Amino acid sequence: MRILPRDEHIISRANISENALKVLYRLNQAGHEAYLVGGGVRDLLLGKVPKDFDVATSATPDEVKDLFRNCRLIGRRFRLAHIRFGREIIEVATFRAHHDSDDDGDGDQSENGMILRDNVYGTRDQDAVRRDFTVNCLYYDVRDFSVIDFASGVDDLNARLIRVMGDPVTRYREDPVRILRAARFAAKLDFDVEDETRDAIDETAAGLEDIPAARLFEEVLKLFMTGHALASFEWLRELDVFRFLFPATDHLIDEDERALALIEAALRSTDTRIAEGKPVTPAFLLAAILW
């Protein structure tokens, strides 16, 4: 673990959502640990404007709900608190622990290691090693303005690398959607995928067939509807996992180059519209991909 004091990083409270700061302050004042975590910290360190701000805390979901009247608890597999401020939602997650540390938590794994229910609560340090990628294992402490880097995430940011936390095979088996997230982050950040993180995909990608269609659809929206659709598609093809999302289309692309040209044109058009602030719809992309 490495702690970067305020004078060793570029994050300023001026660039953090006022509502996220309110959540952090109130949780701290109530005696709970609370940190800005994940993509928000990563993007701030890269000099980008985060789309969302997420908080990790020692408070349980029910304790969070007791502190915020504008809070709604969601999810069964992964219990979360959503605190709404107008159109902005601050997502608050309780620190998670490994399932083998479960005393009275609510966790469940399949025989092949996939996490089916993940409500085993723990400490900040236990939560850190449960994060998906090193560049997302970064915690901002509003109490002293420091950044806590648990896994050389800052080094990987500087090297522009997506690297899985821990053993990639184990982590992909716990949640195969992490494979799609690796492709999405590589596309979004214009990073490369670290060799071991990439190599483990061949062995574990079939686990995507066991993910519910509704959850895969959510990931497709994140891949293709957030401004980096063409790059995401290229990474999905590079990692040979596009076939788990659109098997018929993947087969056709290998047979007819016109299919590839149509999809690339549709994805490029979507990226352009998002960059120009114009509305987009998944119906258009799905029509092109399934044409």
Image (cartoon, rainbow, N blue to C red):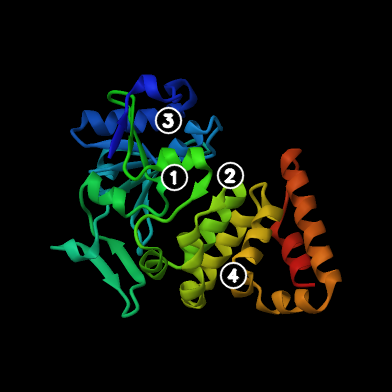
Q: For mark 2, what is the residue?
A: 189
* Quadrant the N terminus occupies: top left
Choose between 103 and 148: the one closer to the eye: 148
- Give the image location of residue 251, x and y in percent: 72, 79
CA–CA distance between discs 1 and 3?
Answer: 24 Å
Q: Position of residue 149 (x, y in %)?
A: 34, 38
Residue 254: which quarter of the image? Answer: bottom right
Q: CA distance from mark 4 to mark 1?
A: 22 Å
Distance of label 2 from label 4 (alpha carbons): 19 Å
Residue 240, position in %: x, y?
A: 61, 70
Residue nearer the viewer, 66 or 152: 152
For image coordinates 39% across by 23% down, the residue present is 8
**What percent of the width, then of the height, locates residue 55?**
36, 40
Closer to the observer: label 1 or label 3?
Answer: 1
Answer yes or no: is residue 210 visible. Answer: yes
Q: Does the CB distance between marks 1 and 2 fall below 8 Å?
A: yes
> As displayed, is residue 268 above or below residue 20?
below
**Between discs 1 and 2, the one toward the N terminus:** 1
Relative horizontal placement of residue 240, taking residue 37 as reference (left or right): right
Earlier residue among tags 4 and 1? 1
Instruction: Determine whether the residue tagged by mark 2 lies in a helix, strand or loop.
Output: helix
Residue 135 - label: 1
